[in-house]
Amino acid sequence: MIRIEQVSKTFGQGKNSVVALAPLDQFIGEGEFIAIVGPSGCGKSTLLRIVAGLETATEGRITLGTSQLKRPVGFVFQDAVLLPWKTVAGNIRFPLDTSGVPRKVGDRKVEELVELVGLQGFENALPKQLSGGMKQRTAIARALADDPAILLMDEPFSAVDLMTREGLNDELLRIWQATGKTILLVTHSVEEAAYLGTKVMVMSARPGRLRKTYDVALPSPRTEETKTSADYLDLVGELKHMMRDADR
Ligand SMILES: Nc1ncnc2c1ncn2[C@@H]1O[C@H](COP(=O)(O)OP(=O)(O)OP(=O)(O)O)[C@@H](O)[C@H]1O
């Protein structure tokens, strides 16, 4: 679980300071899939970076309920940022090598992850030989290599075409169900948020604050039929309305 209590962030000081996040509270249960939407600059990435420990909150605190000693998060960015000279397998095993996992254990883990993200047959391909979607699958596998309890994803599919993106959404739901990870995903698409999330957090800009958290009551597993159901379309409509409001 993740408990976010009165977390705020101000960059800089004095008259040049920017309030990126006004105090924000949110409880996230184990295994939930949280989608975060909001206008550009409302602090979505900042929130994710604070949860990851890449940024410190100005005030408030974040409690990660886990027995793991190191911060148990994996991060997937908009760009896959793969090491260009390493193969798919080499990129996935990079975090394992740096944390000193024995070769054989690492080999098994890489094999498992390649299968999980559906990249069998491409283990020895270099990033330049991969499509955008395949690069993101590799990045997801790499983020899962350390077996983090929490997967943080910052607009992971915004650089791929719509068809690929829809396929990756279904893959991600399958991976989430197979691994039981807690996922926080930032997206600009309310359709994607409603399709993926168990909850959707809607944020507003200037300063970034949480407008509302929606519980998504759509049945699981989500399928193509979900996208034509009245409940889904109602939720998308409501999220769009809230987003328009949030942008003012
Ligand atoms: N390192 C920084 N120094 C100063 N200001 C920053 C820094 N990082 C972010 N900001 C500011 O904080 C605010 C929130 O930024 P953030 O990137 O979290 O928003 P976002 O909702 O993720 O935006 P987008 O949807 O465009 O990616 C913005 O006004 C941004 O300019």
Image: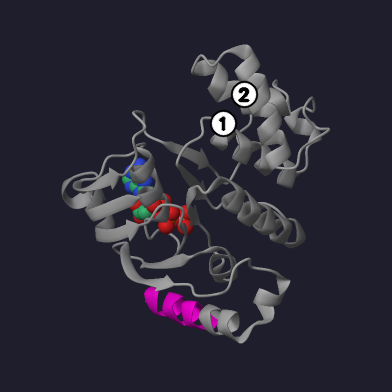
In this picture, is 14 found above or below 215? above
Q: Secondary structure at mark 2?
A: helix
Secondary structure under badge 1? loop
Q: Is residue 236 left or right of residue 130?
A: left
Which span is picked out in magenta? Answer: 237-247
Query: Can residue 120 be seen by looking at this rendering?
Result: yes
Task: Indicate whether 191 appears above or below 185.
Answer: below
Label number found at residue 27: none
Name which of mark 1 and mark 2 comes first in the sequence. Answer: 2
x then y, percent, for residue 201:
41, 66
Question: Can you give x and y, in whole percent of width and height, for residue 203 in the image?
Answer: 38, 66
Residue at 56% in and 36% down: 144
Q: How is the image coloured?
A: one colour
Q: Residue at x 76, y 38 (%)?
A: 119
Mark 1 near mark 2, Cβ–Cβ under 8 Å? yes
What residue is pinned by disc 2? Answer: 93
Dot 1 corresponds to which residue?
145
> Is 245 placed above or below 20 here?
below
Locate residue 220, reporting x and y percent. Answer: 59, 68
> Viewer-proximal residue, 221 or 52?
221
Q: Main secondary structure of the magenta part?
A: helix
| Nearest the eye: 179 or 209 | 179
Amino acid type, mark 1: Ala
Question: Which quadrant of the view contains residue 244?
Answer: bottom left
Residue 33 in the magenta stretch? The answer is no
Residue 167, given in percent of the width and then of the height, sits at 73, 57
